[in-house]
Image: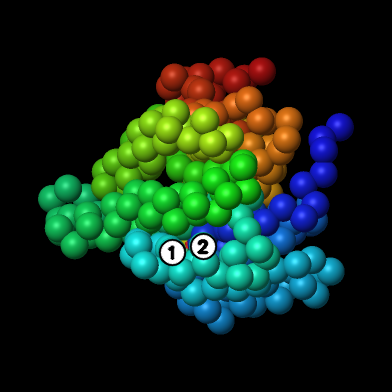
Amino acid sequence: MFASLAGRRVIVTGASKGIGRGIALRFARAGCQVLVVSRTFAEADAVAAEIVRAGGIAAACAADISKQAEAESMAGAAVAAFGGIDILCANAGIYPAAKLGTMTESDFDRVIGTNLKGCVMSVQACLPAMKAAGAGRIILTSSITGPITGYPGWSHYGASKAGQLGFMRTAAIELAPSNITVNAVLPGNIFTEGLSELGADYIRKMESSVPMRRLGTVNDVANAALFFASDEAAYITGQAMAIDGGQILPESLAALEEMDAG
Ligand code: NAP
């Protein structure tokens, strides 16, 4: 039985849709107070309103987390709304594809700026409030792409997601004395608005590469984030957990064929 997280003050970046929205709704259902963050206020506000309509506590904030000043205003908004910050889900990320032959400097800067720098800026901005509270939980949304696997078109993305884990390991050491843990969820292919834009053909191929034969849901990822935020995970820090239906396990297509053969 897990202890209640009711009343914990949570920031979820990139929470206007997709995995972040799923995390925000899940933490709200667990009784947390949730700051829903994205660059587009109206979309963040719609998710906050959805939480409030369901009887939860939420507020919305527009911030571009790749900019230090805006990440700081986001942390300030959580302190103003809820009186502090207990949990940060640094989830905002983008995944525009670009192969090496055509990737521009600005493609690279945008992906690294949002996914890696944005993650670091979000964490840094929340530290004063977490240290004041005497504890904190930080959950990064990385990916299997980069830390474990590769996919043509996503070399910059993979670098950003692997970079998050490099950041996490040192941050976890630096923050351990402050009773702040830092862990990462590594989603496989999760069905989101962002992923659906990659097309039906891509989604069908992805499903066939997953031993569980389905894409993940945003709740699959949110449940893992909730675990890292729980009191029961207090002694876990600097760890990465794949939520991928076994996607990274088969060593070849033959392994999946053998699985199907029973
Ligand atoms: P999504 O549906 O495209 O949603 C992305 C969210 O991030 C939106 O709320 C977006 O809102 C926000 N965002 C983007 N740039 C931002 C910025 N600079 N500052 C603040 N918010 C920003 O994406 P998703 O598929 O849920 O992915 C969420 C995270 O999971 C990402 O880190 C992604 O790399 C990771 N991931 C996803 C999958 C998957 O299968 N979907 C797999 C592995 C990892 P605005 O545009 O309004 O700012």
Is residue 240 toward the left or the right of residue 111 in the image? right
For image coordinates 51% across by 23% down, the residue present is 249
Residue that numbered label 2 is attached to: 75
Q: Residue 262 placed where, x, y %?
A: 66, 18
Asked if 232 appears above or below 131 in the picture, the reply is above
Q: Residue 209 placed where, x, y %?
A: 51, 35
Residue that numbered label 1 is attached to: 72
Asked if 61 appears above or below 194 in the picture, the reply is below
Circle 1 packing at 10 Å, graded few (<14), some (14-19), many (20+), is some
Q: Residue 49 placed where, x, y %?
A: 71, 76
Q: Residue 194 placed where, x, y %?
A: 48, 61
Q: Is mark 1 on a helix, strand or loop?
A: helix
For image coordinates 48% across by 35% down, the residue present is 175
Q: What element carries label 2?
A: helix
Q: Nearer the viewer, residue 26 or 149?
A: 26
At label 2, the amino acid type is Ala
